Amino acid sequence: MLQEVHVGHKSLADYQSMVVGSLVDEIRELAKELEGARVLHVNATSFGGGVAEILYTLVPLMRDVGLETDWRVIMAAQEFYEGTKLTHNSLQGDSVTLDQAQRDIYETHNRIAAESLGSGYDFIVIHDPQPLLIRNYAGDLGAKWIWRCHIDTSTPNQDTADYLLPYVQQYDTAIFSMEQYVFRGLDIPLRIFVPAIDPLSTKNMALSPEDAEYVVSQFGIEGDYPLMLQISRFDPWKDPLGVIDAYRLVKQDYPDLRLALVGSMATDDPEGWSFFTHTVEHAGEDSDILILSNLNNVGNLEVNAFQARADIIVQKSTREGFGLTVSEALWKAKPTVGGNVGGIPVQIINGKTGFLVESVEQCADRCRWILDNPEDAKVMGRTGKEHVRANFLTPRLLRDYLKLFNDLRG
């Protein structure tokens, strides 16, 4: 079944001073042609992932400019999420794919969701592979159907690709985060939308150094110690084990260094629970490593405070859909060290807004540079913040969707 997600109110006018140029005026002009249009977003979870965070801002902003916009999540049994996590990994190149029993579960829950969809929408946006099959079971319903793929499908497991491609082909258009992520074999119209962050959300709003210090002190980070931080799900692709290894190398030169690994456990990611345990085991008895999740009451405010307090922020992914945590870090004017994969190089301009790395040793070396050169690191951080302002704030993403909707209407 599909369950509605309730969101608060947001006003586009509140973003006027934060975005560049005449973006707000452009958005309002595009929205005039779409007044009263009905839009539905469907994804797999309402918390714990980047897609949910985007929708918590995008949906109310669409409403604010005159579109009647709903957001629903697919509710299913645990074995459905276990299977779709395999699909997610398989689309990113993992060798494991769904067996027939898992495909049956996947198809059954999508069919049930389609039956509860309803009609009357002008545009239906399906996010990622979990609810992908809804279009097949629902029919067109007089709507324009859009598949928004947030992951890298450039080198998928071929069995998975062959299985899913006919379902994707039923859509009117597909959106990917980067050109190189596009699912091979598609012959439907394509769009490239880079994701974006909400500068007014609790996670990204301005915090004073004193407030940030107070919040992180509640978790044992006290005193003027250098802090290294990674914010991400506990997922092998995010490489928290590699972050721990890099921290240990840096700590040889900076013995007071602390490391915080902060993540969230999402309902659509059962693999995260076991990898969280694996990460704790890899950290061992080092009391200077802090591993936290939403189970420790770490929410958006706490994430914001850790980013504001950190001296070095890392996103050492080995595979990445886009990596919005990088834009979040740069928005706090923090020089950021990221894996040279996926959407991270779009956000990190190597040597200007942060550093791109391909190994534990490179990661450690760049982290040392940041600690060795604090003034240059501040300049790098300010440059990164302006790069995000120009490219990765939610009003720009809203504009992209409005352009697409207008084009689909002809």
Image (cartoon, rainbow, N blue to C red):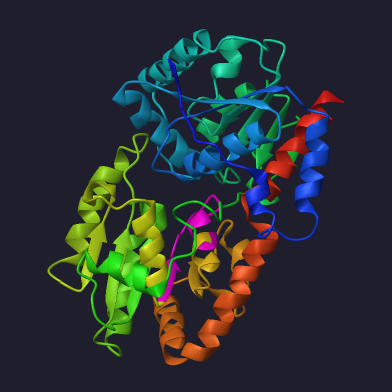
Q: Is 315 situated above or below 382?
A: above
Q: Is 359 situated above or below 120?
A: below
Report the side of 23 relative to 393 (left or right).
Answer: right
Report the side of 137 relative to 397 (left or right).
Answer: left
Residue at image coords 78%, 34%:
31
Q: Position of residue 70 (x, y in %)?
A: 57, 25
Screen quadrant of the C terminus? top right
Q: Nearer the viewer, residue 107 or 163?
A: 107
Q: Which residues, given as a range, are shown in magenta?
A: 312-327
Q: Position of residue 17 (x, y in %)?
A: 68, 59
Q: Position of residue 110 (x, y in %)?
A: 48, 17
Q: Nearer the viewer, residue 159 or 15?
A: 15
Q: Magenta segment: does it hold 23?
A: no
Residue at image coords 49%, 33%:
7
- Number of numbered discs present? 0
Q: Which residue extends farthest left? A: 285
Screen quadrant of the N terminus? top left
Q: Is 254 situated above or below 73?
A: below
State which quadrant residue 74 falls in: top left
Q: Position of residue 257 (x, y in %)?
A: 28, 81
Q: Nearer the viewer, residue 19 or 265?
A: 19
Q: Magenta segment: does it hold 326?
A: yes
State which quadrant residue 232 falls in: bottom left
Residue at image coords 37%, 58%:
303
Q: Is 28 situated above or below 16?
A: above
